[in-house]
Image: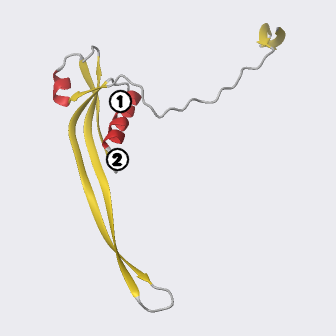
């Protein structure tokens, strides 16, 4: 089952035992579900807790839904080694954009005016990431 192989390294005889079988390659497991033990609270509460140390303050914003925003915060906290997130500011607003579009008709000189309405959700959060020794 095992094959003995000898080699000379720096004038020393070393002996290696290599298995004859090759390890099986498994495809990577990709999950979109975030499994973490991150607690959410207010920044004021976590700063007053003696067991919590503030790591960093982050601001995340963009055209994100509330769930995407919270998932981004959880990922940041996991990356930085934190286990608690204190929310200090959360803003959500809808942005409506109206654009006027002119379309020329085929075979004649007439122009059709179209009004296009786009609605975007803009959200941002300012949060502090903490490392706490006790459960909150």
- Say which residue appears at 22% left-offset and 42% top-offset: 90
Per the image, the residue denoted by label 1 is: 77
How many residues crowd around disc 2 within 10 Å: few (fewer than 14), some, or many (20 or more)?
Answer: some
- Say which residue appears at 34% left-offset and 51% top-offset: 63
Q: Quadrant of residue 116?
A: bottom left
- Cβ atoms under marks 2 and 1 closer than 8 Å: no
Residue furthest bottom as drawn: 109
* Residue 11 place in picture, x, y as percent: 80, 10
Dot 1: element? helix
- Say which residue appears at 54% left-offset and 32% top-offset: 30
Q: Is residue 91 left or right of residue 26?
A: left
**Label drawn at residue 123:** none
Of 129 and 34, the residue lying toward us: 34
Dot 2: element? loop
Q: Earlier in the sequence, mark 2 or mark 1?
A: 2
* Residue 86 place in picture, x, y as percent: 24, 30
Q: Quadrant of residue 112?
A: bottom left
- Above or below: residue 86 compared with residue 135: below
Q: Quadrant of residue 35?
A: top left
Of 81 and 31, the residue lying toward us: 31
Per the image, the residue denoted by label 2 is: 64
* Residue 56 place in picture, x, y as percent: 29, 32
Q: CA distance from mark 2 to mark 1?
A: 18 Å
How many residues crowd around disc 1 within 10 Å: few (fewer than 14), some, or many (20 or more)?
Answer: many
* Residue 134 place in picture, x, y as percent: 27, 13
Q: Is residue 115 left or right of residue 34?
A: left
Which color mode does the image show?
Answer: secondary structure
Q: Is residue 101 left or right of residue 92?
A: right
């Amino acid at each position: 089952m095992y094959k003995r192989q000898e080699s000379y390294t720096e004038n020393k005889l070393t002996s290696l035992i290599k298995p004859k079988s090759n390890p099986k390659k498994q495809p990577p497991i990709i999950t979109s579900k975030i499994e973490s033990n991150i607690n959410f609270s207010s920044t004021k509460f976590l700063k007053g807790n003696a067991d919590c140390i503030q790591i960093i303050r982050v601001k995340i914003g963009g055209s994100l839904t509330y769930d995407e925003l919270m998932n981004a915060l959880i990922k940041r906290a996991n990356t930085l080694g934190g286990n608690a997130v204190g929310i200090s500011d959360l803003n959500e607003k809808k942005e409506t954009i109206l654009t006027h579009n002119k379309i020329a008709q085929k075979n004649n000189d007439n122009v059709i005016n179209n009004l296009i309405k786009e609605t975007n959700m803009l959200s941002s959060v300012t949060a502090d990431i903490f490392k706490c020794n006790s459960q909150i």
